[in-house]
Image: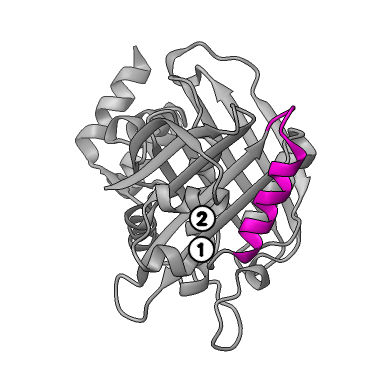
Amino acid sequence: MDKLIHGTAADGTIRVMAAITAEIVREAVRRHQTSPTASAALGRVLTGTLLLGSSLKDFDRLTVRIECDGAIEGIVAETNAQGKVRGYVRNPLAESKGNTVDVKEIIGKGMFHVIREAGFDVGLYREPYHGSVPLYTGEIGDDFAYYLLKSEQIPSAVLLGVALQSEAPYIKAAGGVMLQIMPGANEHLITMIEDTIAHAPHLTKLISEGAAPEDLVKMALGIIDYEILDEREVEFKCSCSPERAAALIASLGKAEVESMLNEDKGAEMTCGFCNQTYHLDEAQLQEIIDSLSN
């Protein structure tokens, strides 16, 4: 099972988050049948979204949405306080040219959006927070850091990696680390961290060699001590269900459902987040029609 840790360093002036997400990315790739470069891009976004959402409260939800003009067209990921994450790309077959995995190439230019919602699933809906910035480099990690700096005024370092292999399931390793610098942080420590990261082994190399989340934090902080405040298992998990599929079809209205029954003798709905398809037969459609008639 994949794992995420959340903690602090330097007397609480630095927030640290790190995760190993290989199983999550493998499951996303399996469901969406993404190309190698699209797999790397989706894996980075899923990992970054988990890290950014690591301090969510019980009924909070965080969505990261990338809208871009590159071949991948867009990426969406969503996570909650329980460490569940789901996501998809608009064009799963997007691939960089040549024999290299170039995420920046298939992303191109565009916008990076973050939506924070509280209490939505339990009826305690509040106006969501929505922050947006232009894509900075299209490498994903840099774009998370740029968003945090420009939209939330939090200087950050974000390192995300997905290591690929030639044979199925194609994802050898995945993970990431995020450092957020809080007000009052010692400038000398910030310089130390910048130097440590600049001279550290490449993140993809570390996760390929079996690094744990703690190893990624040590790589980023160097000799700076840290304290883990929370540790949890994380997984690719969608909130769709047969009941939600039926409710969505019912929301189309009685006339539309009757048309599905009479013309198609059933209905089919596929969840964009996880690619799960739900089939409703004639009896189920008639049940929906009866409920809409009452």
Vertical comparison of 76 with 174: above or below? above
User: Residue at image x 49%, y 33%?
Assistant: 7
Which residue matches tag 1? Answer: 203
Instruction: Tell me where residue 66 appears, x and y as whole percent.
Output: 64, 51
Q: Residues within 10 Å of mark 1 (few under 14, many from 20)?
A: many
Residue 195: say if magenta.
yes
User: Residue at image x 55%, y 77%?
Assistant: 101
In this picture, residue 231 sits left or right of residue 89: left
Please give the range of residues in magenta. Answer: 182-199
The disc placed on residue 110 is: none
Prevailing secondary structure class for the magenta stretch in the rendered image:
helix
In this picture, residue 74 sits left or right of residue 131: left
Q: Quadrant location of the C terminus? A: top left
Tell me if residue 46 can be seen. no
Mark 2 in CB contact with mark 1 (< 8 angstroms): yes
Instruction: Tell me where residue 163 appears, x and y as whole percent.
Output: 44, 69
The quadrant where residue 126 appears: top right
- CA gap between label 2 and label 1 equals 9 Å
Q: Nearer the viewer, residue 122 or 83?
A: 83
In this picture, residue 72 sits left or right of residue 27: right
Which residue type does callout 1 highlight?
Leu
Which residue type does callout 2 highlight?
Met
Most distant residue in the bottom direction: 98
Most distant residue in the left direction: 283
Describe the colour scheme in one phrase: one colour
User: Residue at image x 29%, y 45%?
Assistant: 278
Q: Residues within 10 Å of mark 2 (few under 14, many from 20)?
A: many
Residue 201: say if magenta.
no
Instruction: Tell me where residue 16 appears, x and y as whole percent.
Output: 54, 39
Tell me if residue 232 can be seen. yes
The disc placed on residue 219 is: 2
